[in-house]
Image (cartoon, rainbow, N blue to C red):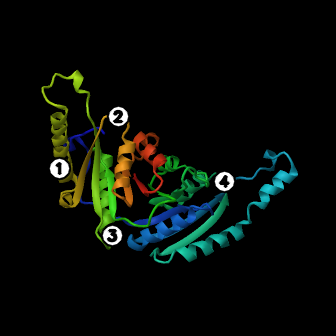
Amino acid sequence: MMSLSPSNMNVEKKAPEPFHIRQVMVALELGATDDKILEYVDFLTHYVPTGALYFLHVLPKFDVLNYKTEQDAQSLVSNYQLNDEVIARMGRKIKSQMVKGGAVHVEFDVREGDPLEELLSDAEDIGANLVIIGQKSGATEHGILAKNLARKARCNALIVPDQAKAEMKNIIVPVDFSEHSVKALRTAIAIREELEADATITCVNVYTMPNLSVYKIKKTKEQFRNMLEEGQLEAFKAFLNTYTPDHKDQIGLRLICREEPGIAKPLLDFALEAKAGLIVMGAKGHSKVELLLLGSVTEKILAMNESIPTLIVK
């Protein structure tokens, strides 16, 4: 990861704001991932103050002209219940599984269209500050890819894999010392403040071990690695002291040296080893151009991750 000096970053030096969910939009597929989504949303809203929960299921657009025979068309129609029946089914499912959550208001709806576009449109309409989708191992049956949601959403996005556990004992924050890392870390701290039990936060930085053969340095590989890690640790301490001074002593630090290409895999491997309950990552920004630059590391983690909920902070 690239290192940046905190003094060169245009980030306001303030205490983390409380993590409250004003409005959250949740995509349901009426399938295998819904149980895990509802379990995790119930867990999250039990601890985090939540104004309103909106659940949405989107039926793909039905166009009879796309089907060769009337029998094919009728077969497809029979696979979908009428909207009022689907809504009733959603209501029963939500009521049966949302038992601890403290949301003030809960709504659910069904409509036809493109799943991602409908979800984002509704999120904009209600002023959501969080959107949540599930992610099935190896597939996303409701048609929303995690990286597409994280890239296009203008608010925070939470992806909950179908193997996730409803717990948050260990929170991992990948750090490259950028302003996006500051946002992610402050959000992680704010989330921890809402939990009844203490959770650990570990900031992780992956650095590259250069090829020493191209340098005229009279040091062993181990000595050079130690020298690099001392510099990274100093950068870490300056980063925490500058942007989270009141919490710096409560945050763990972990350096990971990589000699092979790729940052996402060692990050995810560490999170799995640490039995992380949440990964918090910063996105690039809010403009249309920045939203398209989610970051290859973030996208790869979302693609590989099958068990740890991941919060993308905007």
Identify which residue, 126 or 219, lies in the foreground: 219
Residue that badge 4 annotates: 113
- Measure the C-alpha gap from mark 3 to mark 4: 36 Å
- Dot 4 amino acid type: Gly
Gap in Å between the C-alphas at discs 4 and 1? 49 Å
Q: Give the residue pinned by disc 2.
A: 260
Give percent across and percent down for residue 303: 48, 46
Quadrant position of residue 3 = top left
Q: Which residue is mark 1?
A: 237
Farthest-out residue, left: 218
Question: In the shown orientation, is residue 98 left or right of residue 84?
Answer: left
**Amino acid type of the residue that numbered disc 2 sits on in the rendered structure:** Glu
Among the two numbered marks 3 and 2 on one chain, the one whose residue lies closer to the N terminus: 3
Q: How far apart are labels 1 and 2 at the CA level? A: 26 Å
| SS for dot 4 | loop
Return the residue at label 3: 194
Local secondary structure at mark 1: helix
First-in-chain label (1 vs 2): 1
Which mark is in front, 3 or 4?
3
Residue type indicated by callout 3: Glu
Q: Which one is closest to the eye, mark 1 or mark 2?
A: 2
Residue 66 appears left or right of 36: right
